[in-house]
Image (spheres, rainbow, N blue to C red):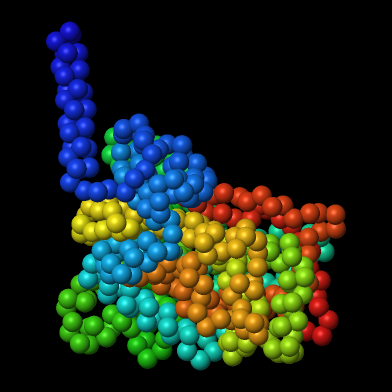
Amino acid sequence: MVYLSLNVQTILAGLTIGYLVYYVIKRMRYRLPPGPWCIPLVGHYKIYGSVEIHKKIAELSKKYGPVVHVKFGPKMLIVLNNIDVTLEAMVKKKADFAGRPKINSMEVFTEGGKDIAFTTYSPTWKLHRKIAGKALRHYLQGDLLESMVQDNAEKFLNKMAEEKEPFFFKDFVDQMIFHQLYTICFGEKRPVDDPEVKALLKLDNDLFDLFGTGLAEDLVPYLKDIYPTARWEKFKKMTEEILQLLHTKFNQHKETFSPDKNRDFIDSLLMARQEAENEGNEDALEKLDDGYLVQTIADIFFAGVDTTRFTMDWFVYFMTRFPETQIKCQEEIDRVVGSGRPSMKDRSSLHYTEGCLFETLRLANVAGLGIPHKTICDTQVGGYDIPKSTTVLINFWALHHDTKYWKDPEQFDPTRYLDEDGKMKPTKPESWLPFSAGRRVCLGETVAKPELLLLCANLLQRFDIRLPDGVKANPEYNLKGFGIELPSDYKIVVKERTGN
Ligand code: HEM
């Protein structure tokens, strides 16, 4: 027994010394970014365990500079905290930072990395991103996006108009955006209270809550094989339900697909496969099997719904907090749009309203710390070495609150984006980057911006929105983990505006 415990002690001591030697050699070989001391293997638990992780890291960057390292358990992560180092890494360094680390939960959700958002930089990722981008651009042609937004918005605005008591805007906008994605991806226009859409929304919300508080299996990867937690099992079950629905939709489309009629996003993907078949492009066909295509749909659906619905929730929150700003938007919408419905052609004239949307995107940290990047080779940023396979995060919150670029960063001020004539400036502010940049820039940016502006304009054209009598705006945020911020729950009342 003594012999055994001695052996265990020897092994532990050996492991510790080995780890220290490895650590010292690594530090000597590379000039790694600085960061605070932490307990080895446990890491900066007060940072990664906090819902204010983005603010804590921004605070660290004041002491250590814009590139800091933080340890999540035994894993070192690098966080970029200003626009210069972010653009250096994501744009100037081309593909160096365009990889993605393997994350256990995402491996399950993406059926082994068949998606776009969480899969690493590779020819397969490039092909799928190209096909998905082309399929999305289809929506920007003619009045497809416009009529889809108007149709969906109308359904839900009518329902909001029926509300006699104060209500949560979130409940309506969540459904509105889900219905919109149903139309884009599946070509379906469903009734307002459709139970299938509601069930998917609930699943998405539950999954989001589960992620917000983190999964132990993502921090300690081998846990899933030796002692999976109950939360992990729940996550797997929920993921299965979601993927099942997407596979069913895909199979239904396959059965009714006709190459000369593009009904929706799924058809666009099937057409891309048909093209590869016609060209006899075996290499592409191998990468276009059903599993990959279903995952591309999941990318568009889930990367699109949460960011868009949370942004809309923030927009209305700001409109209720600043009624005079709301009135200015409405005056502009009335002047530009008149009595018709806001359309794509009005987009370039809704300067003040767009300024409000851009300011919402700056302050609403809906993407949190974004999707983790990974270096695909040894590289550098901000004068530090970043070894191959290092996980790198962008602290969007820090970029959007950097006092070097933003005067009074906490203030909601749409005029930041306008010139002296009240028009949107031709270039965006330097440190404004809600959609990220470089190889991994948000794939949906070109759809999200007009979609959001049309929604905002439709909403404010129809209603005066305010908080219920006697209720003051709650300045507290609802922190969801991994840097994601949402407004605290708030109710609104709406009044139809006359003449619209
Ligand atoms: C307010 C709306 C949105 C915001 C703020 C937003 C923001 C972001 C951010 C920060 C990333 C991570 C970029 C990086 O890794 O550096 C991202 C990735 C992505 N977004 Fe968006 N997004 C929005 C809407 C959308 C929409 C509507 C779609 C789809 C129609 C979409 C599809 C994607 C996809 C597929 C990726 C992964 C790209 C890749 O890894 O190659 N997003 N988005």
Regarding residue 104, the answer to whether it shows in the image is no
Which residue occupies the extreme right position in the image?
469
Regarding residue 431, the answer to whether it shows in the image is yes
For residue 312, side relative to residue 65 (left or right): right
Which residue occupies the extreme top position in the image?
2
Q: Quadrant of residue 456?
A: bottom right
Q: Quadrant of residue 39?
A: top left
The residue lying at 69 percent from left, 89 percent from top is 336
Exactly how many numbered labels are in the figure?
0
The residue lying at 20 percent from left, 17 percent from top is 9
**Residue 385 to residue 233: above or below:** below
Q: Position of residue 364 (x, y in %)?
A: 57, 61
Q: Quadrant of the N terminus?
A: top left
For residue 90, side relative to residue 469 (left or right): left
Q: Position of residue 414 (x, y in %)?
A: 64, 71
Q: Position of residue 400 (x, y in %)?
A: 52, 61
Q: Quadrant of the C terminus?
A: bottom right
Relative to the observer, which residue lies in front, 320 or 402?
402
The residue lying at 30 percent from left, 64 percent from top is 98
**Residue 256 to residue 104: above or below:** below
For residue 289, side relative to residue 295 (left or right): left
Q: Position of residue 226 (x, y in %)?
A: 29, 35
**Residue 140 to residue 123: above or below:** below
User: Quadrant holding ligand 1?
Assistant: bottom left
The residue lying at 48 percent from left, 70 percent from top is 430
